[in-house]
Image (tube, rainbow, N blue to C red):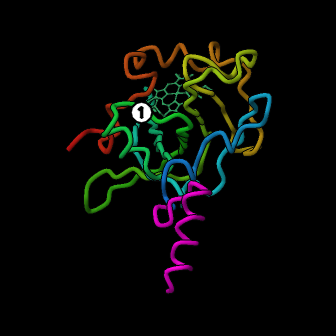
Amino acid sequence: MSIRIASLVLALVFLTGQQPINSQSVSSHNGFDLVDKTGNIRKPADFRDLYQALGVYTPVDLNNNTEMHYTYAPPGTAEYYRKNGKFADGTVLVKEVFATDHAQLTTGDAHWATGTKVWFVMIKDDKGRYPGNPLWGDGWGWALFKSDAPDKQVATNYKKDCLGCHVPAQSTDWVYVQGYPVLKSK
Ligand code: HEC
């Protein structure tokens, strides 16, 4: 490559603020791409393929029914968290709730995920961007989607629909981080 072309490429990289190689940075999966002007939240498409898995919870009810709760976040989320001890502005957390089945396998009584029941979505908001919207507050946007209408956001008020259950995790920014080993510094 001639010096002239090389410096043109460098100038373009500089002007557009793009990093040429690191296309997997947090900013390329910015949660605010999923939000319209008034704060309505969409569920990210293809998060199973594009996001990283943070971890899984498997609550068991009194009838021994198990659910599997997988939590995903955009690439770079865990690395940022390990470095800074917090989630980056715009971080998306998707919790996918599965029904399960189980059987005696060669490992023991093994439970596995079957159909999706619901998706919970949180988007980190450091700036209080949507003060009039009842699904935004306490540093996050909060949303819920059910499998019978997977694109329809159905939560109405995060203080009623979400926050009470997240109080035990308040000191870790409302997130149950203990279940996500990848967030811990090695
Ligand atoms: C019945 C209590 C309950 C309600 C209601 C609830 N959550 Fe949670 N949520 C939890 C618990 C407990 C966890 C972690 C353990 C688990 O999933 O079993 C969790 C985990 C999450 C996660 C994964 C990140 C984390 O904090 O570990 C997201 C995202 C989430 N919830 C979003 C929401 C949103 C959005 C709402 C409201 C629309 C909501 N939750 C309502 C109890 C609740």
| Magenta portion: prevailing SS class | helix
Assign a secondary structure to mark 1. Answer: loop
- The residue depicted at 69 percent of the width and 38 percent of the height is 145
Residue 161, how many percent across, how many down? 64, 19
What residue span does the magenta drawing correspond to? Answer: 1-22
Above or below, 21 relative to 126: below
Pick the quarter of the image with the C terminus: top left
Q: Does the magenta stretch include residue 138?
A: no
Cβ of disc 1 within 8 Å of ligand 1?
Answer: yes
Viewer-closest of 98 and 8: 8
Residue 45, how many percent across, how many down? 66, 54
Residue farthest toward the left in the current orientation of the protein: 186
Tell me: 71 left or right of 92. Answer: left
The residue tagged 1 is 59
Residue farthest toward the bottom in the current orientation of the protein: 1
Report which quarter residue 41 is drawn in.
top right
Residue type at tag 1: Pro
Q: Is residue 10 magenta?
A: yes
Report which quarter residue 13 is drawn in.
bottom right
- The residue depicted at 58 percent of the width and 20 percent of the height is 162
Q: Residues within 10 Å of mark 1 (few under 14, many from 20)?
A: few
